[in-house]
Image: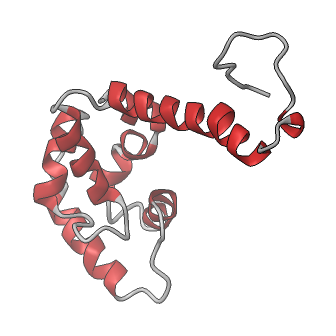
């Protein structure tokens, strides 16, 4: 199990011995965890370069209003060195998904759906790992 200790280790009073254990837990546990999350996000997204890339990547998410919008995907395509013209394939894919009874709900479902029609979407298939691999996505930030 991976975990992070955010304070000096040692003995401290038990939460149950405090007259207000919920308030004590809030101060000693909840606030430090939230503070760490906020600081981590501020560190990762501190520059203005990563936000447009994140917005561009969000066009890969099937429930996004800009799903497979070629204009929105262009920055991600350029940043990830994705080769080929994806616009014709994304247009066809949007049309097919619009007529599907059970469209994909996330990116992995989308890639599984696309792989069933691999001959129709060669440019997307060629670059599929760049689109869904979290390690690749993380390195663009």
Is 93 on the left or on the right of 25, as rendered? left
Identify which residue is drawn at 42% across, 86% down: 100
Q: Where is 117 relative to 96, above or below? A: above
Q: Where is 19 relative to 103, above or below? A: above
- Residue nearer the viewer, 84 or 24: 24
* Residue that extends furthest to the front in the rendered view of this protein: 19
Is 49 on the left or on the right of 4, as rendered? left
- Residue nearer the viewer, 70 or 15: 15
Is 55 on the left or on the right of 11, as rendered? left
The part of the image, by quadrant, that contains residue 18 is: top right
Coloring scheme of the render? secondary structure
Residue 112: where, in percent of width, then height? 51, 61
Residue 107 makes an appearance in the image: yes
Residue 41: where, in percent of width, then height? 39, 33
Which quadrant does the C terminus fall into?
A: top left
Identify which residue is drawn at 31% across, 67% down: 64
Identify which residue is drawn at 67% across, 35% down: 29
Residue 28: where, in percent of width, then height? 67, 31
Identify which residue is drawn at 71% across, 38% down: 24
- Residue nearer the viewer, 95 or 104: 104
Q: How many marks?
A: 0
The part of the image, by quadrant, that contains residue 120 is: bottom left
Residue 83 makes an appearance in the image: no
Which quadrant does the N terminus fall into?
A: top right
Q: Where is 75 relative to 114, above or below? A: above
* Residue that extends furthest to the left in the rendered view of this protein: 71
Residue 65: where, in percent of width, then height? 25, 71
The part of the image, by quadrant, that contains residue 11 is: top right
């Amino acid at each position: 199990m991976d975990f992070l200790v955010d304070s000096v280790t040692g003995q401290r009073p038990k939460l149950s011995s405090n007259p207000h254990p919920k308030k004590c837990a809030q101060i000693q546990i909840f606030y430090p965890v939230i503070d760490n999350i906020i600081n981590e996000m501020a560190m990762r997204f501190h520059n203005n370069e990563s936000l447009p890339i994140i917005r561009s990547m969000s066009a890969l998410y099937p429930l996004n209003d800009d799903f497979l919008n070629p204009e929105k995907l262009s920055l991600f395509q350029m940043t990830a060195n994705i080769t080929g013209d994806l616009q014709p394939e994304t247009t066809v894919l949007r049309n097919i998904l619009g007529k599907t009874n059970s469209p994909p709900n996330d990116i992995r479902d989308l890639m599984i759906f696309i792989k069933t029609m691999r001959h129709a979407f060669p440019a997307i298939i060629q670059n599929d790992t760049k689109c869904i691999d979290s390690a690749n996505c993380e390195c663009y930030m």
